[in-house]
Amino acid sequence: MKTWIPDARNFAYLNWKQVDALPRESTLLVLPTAAIEQHGHHLPLATDTLINNLLLGHALSRLPPEFPVYALPPVHYGKSNEHIGFPGTLSLGAATFMAVLRDLGASLSSARFRKLVLYNTHGGNSSLIDVMARDLRAEFGLRTFALHGSGGISFEGQSPQERAYGFHAGEVETALLLASVPELVDRTAYTVNYIADIAKPEVLRPENAPAVFAWLTRDIAPSGVLGDPRPATAEKGALWLDQAAKRLAAALEAMSSYPNQPRP
Ligand SMILES: [Zn+2]
């Protein structure tokens, strides 16, 4: 898989003596989690994994060298059963995904590391990431952080409809890939599907509401796209990448500086 992680920040490029020499109290390890799943007719299965690596790599490149922060090899597979029925989707069950994170946390804890970030770029993993961040804290004493997506940037220039319901393979993901791996985007194969309409706010919504319904992509989007990729450009992707990298770098700096002992 293509990587944007700087070599000097790549944990798996170290040998064990170099790992043993890392300062245990302050070293912050980042575990990327993403997915291998259908992304419509126009984006590759690895879209979430590529975006994770792209954003994290650019964030790590911005960190001052004195911050001891390393990227672990990613967990490529995620909980993707919302995309079952589309060839190429490779999903882990929730229990398997959580067990993988627990086992990696156990390994890091036994090597006496103290700080771990779960950096996730696949929506289907989000609730499991939040559960595991707390469980790793409770079980192993790891100071665990959860970091999601683009660090909360506003994606200026998006339509309100796309901002609310561009969930998957829409403008943002397409723009980020156009800016980084345009050869993997088929611009002749865009399709558009929306799960809901912001002009018709219903009591029951797909996400981000007190009352939600559990959706499967195949119920509502025959092409696999949830959103509109047509307004995506490489320029927007480059702008959003830059903004997200800044936010993520600031979050990593804050995590790196966060005290290991609980605050009084
Ligand atoms: Zn995606």
Image (spheres, rainbow, N blue to C red):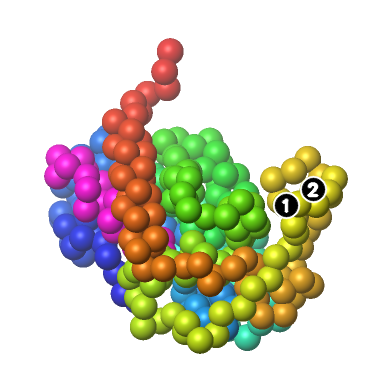
Give me the residue at 53% from left, 35% from top. Answer: 138
Residue 18 in percent (x, y) is at 15, 54
The residue to which callout 1 is attached is 198
Query: Is 2 part of what is drawn in magenta?
Result: no
Q: CA distance from mark 1 to mark 2?
A: 6 Å
Q: Split into 4 quadrants, where in the image is the C terminus?
A: top left
Asked if labels 2 and 1 touch by Cβ distance under 8 angstroms, the answer is: yes
Q: Residue furthest right?
A: 203
Mark yes or no: residue 100 visible: no
Residue 31 in percent (x, y) is at 40, 54
Q: Is mark 1 within 8 Å of ligand 1?
A: no
Residue 135 in percent (x, y) is at 56, 41
Q: Badge 2: how crowded within 10 Å, few (<14), some, or many (20+)?
A: few
Q: Where is residue 38, by image quadrant?
A: bottom right
Give me the residue at 35% from left, 36% from top. Answer: 255
Query: Is 69 part of what is drawn in magenta?
Result: yes
Q: Main secondary structure of the magenta part?
A: helix
Dot 2: element = loop
Give me the residue at 74% from left, 43% from top. Answer: 209
Q: Tell me the magenta residue range.
A: 49-70
Mark yes or no: residue 121 visible: yes
Query: In this rendering, is residue 21 above or below 45?
Result: above
Residue 148 in percent (x, y) is at 48, 49
The residue to which callout 2 is attached is 201
* Left/right of residue 96 with respect to residue 35 in the rendered view: right
